[in-house]
Image: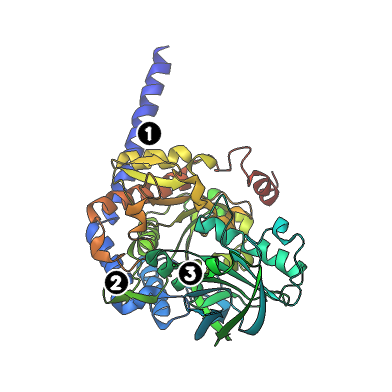
Amino acid sequence: MRTSVLLLLLFTITFSIHAQDEVEKVKSTVSKSKIEGHIYFLASDELKGRQTGSPENKIAAQYLANMLRSYGVKPIPGSKSYLQTVELKKTSGATKSIFKTENIELKKIATINKINANYKGKAVFINYGLKEDYKNLSVKGKYVISYIGTKDNKDIRNAFSLAKQKSKFARDKGAIGVIEISNIDDNLWAQIDHYFNGDEMEIMGQNKSSDDLPYVIVNDPTEEVSKAFTTKKETDIEINIEGIKQSNVYSQNVVGIVEGSDPKLKNEYIIYSAHYDHVGIGKAVENDSIYNGARDNAVGTVTVLSAAENIAKYPTKRSALFIMFTGEEKGLLGSKWYVEHPVLPLKQMIYCFNSDNGGYNDTSLATIIGLNRTTAKDDIINAATKFGLKAIDDPAPEQGLFDRSDNVNFAAKGIPAPTFSMGFTAFDEEITKYYHQVTDNPDSVDYDYLFKFFQSYVLACRNIANNPKTPFWVEGDKYYDAGKKLYQK
């Protein structure tokens, strides 16, 4: 009995010393001044919002590669480079957009489907453009006009999610284009305009269907167009969309490797990932047109740099693969490219610990999107606790955040992949004040909070990478079966 007690005491002391040792390793490499330095550079006006394919995006990629090199992180296997080329096709925004009907002319137009259009003829009003709205209407060879969203749900995100479905209904009935009428305030319209009328990108070779229809949203704040249809179903319109063209673009993912210290576990890799691109230059607000992207996602990028510096100095039992993606803001393109062109077999990647941010509204928290979906939950919670933060899961499931960052492309392949984010309790005004806004500057961030946040992330990385038990999805998760298939469990 006495021997058992002594052994238990010895184990407890050893474990405590090891845990404290890991904390000290984190403290020795993570500093507030380094965090500030990196973020102030990546989110500087000189980098002009790091838009994918821009010269400034390339400068950011080279900066990140040089940081990895300076830490002693190894380049892509079989090369001397940290840069993985991502082949993209760019479709530019329109140079001219006009909608006319009767005596009304509107120019606030968002090109959902980037297709040039020059049409003068009949348009049929079809209420909300849903299947039942076409009953007893002939729309063949005509444009259709509808309200945005649905009668019961005009939320803009819901409206966008219905666009593909509405386009199919219109095409199946023989319509040649779709116009949705909205009444959106200037602030939200500025975001929509920036997103849809800017350059669009896709993976090279993934061409649009040839039967896509021109599909636009016209903003009608005084509801003149809506009033014009109160007494009739059909009218003459004119719509002119010009200047949309395509070109090839080459951007870069930044990739580096640190080999693990354990003879067996080093064959398993943890991916530490973040996207480094942002949305570039857009509509000026109070004479500022640069969307710097400090929170989104210079912060996430620098958490990965911090993990790279730490793990390069103090290798973990499992190997580390650091990936900083381009093209996230264009549709998760860098990560989509990577999972189809991995530098090492995906079946060796047993976890992807992504870092992405929209903002924060609670500096006592670290919010992990998907915290409860993998068995590494306790490793993350314990790390946050060590630095005075509480780790919580996604408080805004209605936003679909798990499926809106690069982690989802790894999850779809079966790799457990949560996203480590700054603390928020709701996707509220404090978040949207900065999210994809010109206000998201490096001098608007709380660096005392970030210091704790970064330390928590790096310690969580170390906990997961040193845990003898391989992490996996919680049984019943959406991606559980994909994981079983990938790892042949």
Q: In the visual, does 240 lie left or right of 16?
A: right
User: Residue 282's spot in the image, x, y percent?
Assistant: 39, 76
Structural distance between the alpha carbons of marks 3 and 1: 65 Å
Foreground disc of the pair 3, 1? 3
Foreground disc of the pair 2, 1? 2
Question: Of the residues shown, which amino acid type is indicated by label 2?
Answer: Phe
List the residue tagged with mark 2: 41
Q: Is residue 13 above or below residue 104?
A: above
Residue ID at (64%, 84%): 119
* Secondary-structure class at tag 2: helix
**Earlier sequence position, callout 3 versus callout 1:** 1
Question: 383 and 364: which one is in front?
Answer: 364
List the residue tagged with mark 3: 220
**Earlier sequence position, callout 2 versus callout 1:** 1
User: Residue 380's spot in the image, x, y percent?
Assistant: 42, 42
**Earlier sequence position, callout 2 versus callout 3:** 2
Residue ID at (77%, 62%): 136
Q: Is residue 305 visible?
A: no
List the residue tagged with mark 1: 15
Whether label 2 touches label 3, CB < 8 Å: no
Q: Quadrant of residue 446?
A: bottom left
Would you call the spot at circle 1 few (<14 residues within 10 Å), some (14-19), or many (20 or more)?
A: few
Question: Of the residues shown, which amino acid type is indicated by label 1?
Answer: Phe
